[in-house]
Image (spheres, rainbow, N blue to C red):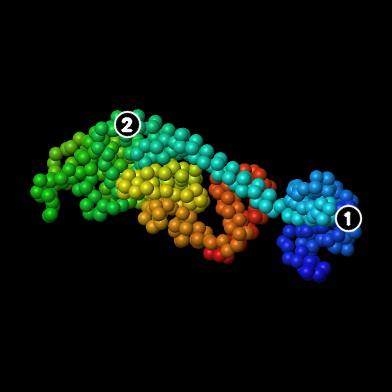
Amino acid sequence: MLMQKDLDNLLDLFYDGVIITDRNGTIVKVNKAYQRLTATSADQLIGMDIRDTVGVQLHSNESSTMRVLEEKRPVTIIQRARLDHEFKELMTTGMPMFNEQHEIEFVVNCVRDMTELSQLKWHLNEIEKMNRNYLEEIKTLKQMQVHENGLVVYSKAMLDVREAALKVAAVDSPVMLRGESGVGKEVIAKFIHRNSKRAKGAFIKVNCGAIPASLMESEFFGYEAGAFTGANKEGKAGFFELADKGTLFLDEIGDMPLDLQVKLLRVLEEQEFRRVGGVKTIRSDVRIIAATNQELETMVEQKTFRKDLYYRLQVYPIVIPPLRERKEEIPLFIEHFLKNYQEKNAIQIQITLEAVQLLCQHNWPGNIRELINVLERMAITCDNNTILPEHLPRELFGNLGKIIPKTFQEEIDLFEYQGMKRALALHKSTRKAALALQMSQPTLVRRMKQFDQKFRNDL
């Protein structure tokens, strides 16, 4: 038979608060969990009428005990009580204990603090809402995008680039494409060609930095039979002949030697040239599109690039922004690449939303070329044909995707952390992200600092 001390010890093992009253509503027993929850002591509570606690401190305006006594059945209620200078949400279940005459002898109440769980539920709902909004934006983005032969356009900056490219495509003026390596200058050059009156003609790409200086002249203008040792006995047509009635795309124009720059300028002005070793003048109707990631203005000052050629090519400059300035297009590039990869390799590849969000946060110094390189690597190395955060290259993203929560609370924190990072990636500022998550900006910043420190230590 349980002694009084044993009963006390048993009740103190409960995680939930326990409060017992007699048939008159007088408190006769409370366990330690209830004392911690209400910041009171047993001495303060035992002997107190439960009615005196209603609406004061321990309970809201409804008492589970009084309902049990009135209804003579188990009752569960949700209370909002002010405890220790803050409001808490409590779930209280009252159970009647009957004597042999079927009269209530005692009422046993189990009280559970639902505050953290309710807050977690609210945050999870908000994160889920944010994810739905994100997916809706992706859907809208897909509807608005221009997607033709590798040209992905959605951002305002790239819409301006596309409009400028369409305007110049209608005329034959030289075009200079400026921008960092990997931003898609060749894609824009092909877009201009396809939308010009030369679309049925050839599009010839020449990488000026990849041809040995000794071969540049013969490659550009061709050569006659026997022009030099090792020459083809039938001669060879150069780029200008091959691109007649079409477009000649001069990539990395800043790497062209000065002596060839002189000859290129003459061809642009006179639209004629001679093959190496030849005497016949050849007419060439070629549209020139040049591209560079170098500061040609500085090269002109340093006399490593001819000023007259610079002005001849710089008739219609188009600056293509780096990927870090149009991150909203990254999901489209991912979709475009995965679609092409699947068609080429006849396999299905998927990518999780978390992985997309992390990819959107990177600045991509190598621009689209670097993004495509990373996507292809992950497509090869991923398990079950699904790209997860853990497949992201460690040298770019660290081990964030490989954090394994050790406790339920850490799993919750990691989920909240990733949700906040998604909001920041999507909205670009802490103020807008906090607004989307329905929390204050200082709270967002403080929580992010806490999580950064917590999870960076696990890397």
Q: Nearer the viewer, mark 2 or mark 1?
A: 1
Residue at image position (75%, 66%) is: 10
Q: Is residue 305 found left or right of 421 in the rendered image?
A: left
| Between 421 and 180, the one nearer to me in the picture | 421
Q: Is residue 433 found left or right of 94 in the rendered image?
A: left
Q: Which mark is residue 26?
A: 1
Residue at image position (88%, 50%) is: 51
Q: Quadrant of residue 132?
A: top right
Task: Characterize the local packing of mark 2: few (<14), some (14-19) or many (20 or more) Cα atoms within 10 angstroms.
Answer: many
Three-letter code, disc 1: Thr
* Pointers 2 and 1 in contact (C-beta within 8 Å): no
Question: How far across and down, in percent of the image, does residue 238 sit?
Answer: 20, 44
Residue at image position (61%, 56%) is: 413
Q: How far is mark 2 from mark 1, CA to CA?
A: 92 Å
Q: Earlier in the sequence, mark 2 or mark 1?
A: 1
| Between 165 and 32, the one nearer to me in the picture | 32
- Height in image: 453 above or below 294? below
Q: Which residue is mark 2?
A: 196
Q: How many marks?
A: 2
Quadrant location of the N terminus in the rendered image:
bottom right
Q: Is residue 386 found left or right of 251 in the rendered image?
A: right
In the displayed image of the protein, which residue is found farthest to the front? 101
- For label 2, the SS is loop
Question: How far across and down, in percent of the image, does residue 430 sit?
Answer: 62, 48
Question: How far across and down, in percent of the image, does residue 92 sit?
Answer: 76, 51
Question: How far across and down, in percent of the image, does residue 261 sit?
Answer: 29, 46
Residue at image position (34%, 49%) is: 347
Q: Is residue 44 visible?
A: yes
Three-letter code, disc 2: Ser
- For label 1, the SS is loop
Q: Which mark is residue 47?
A: none
- Height in image: 122 above or below 190? below
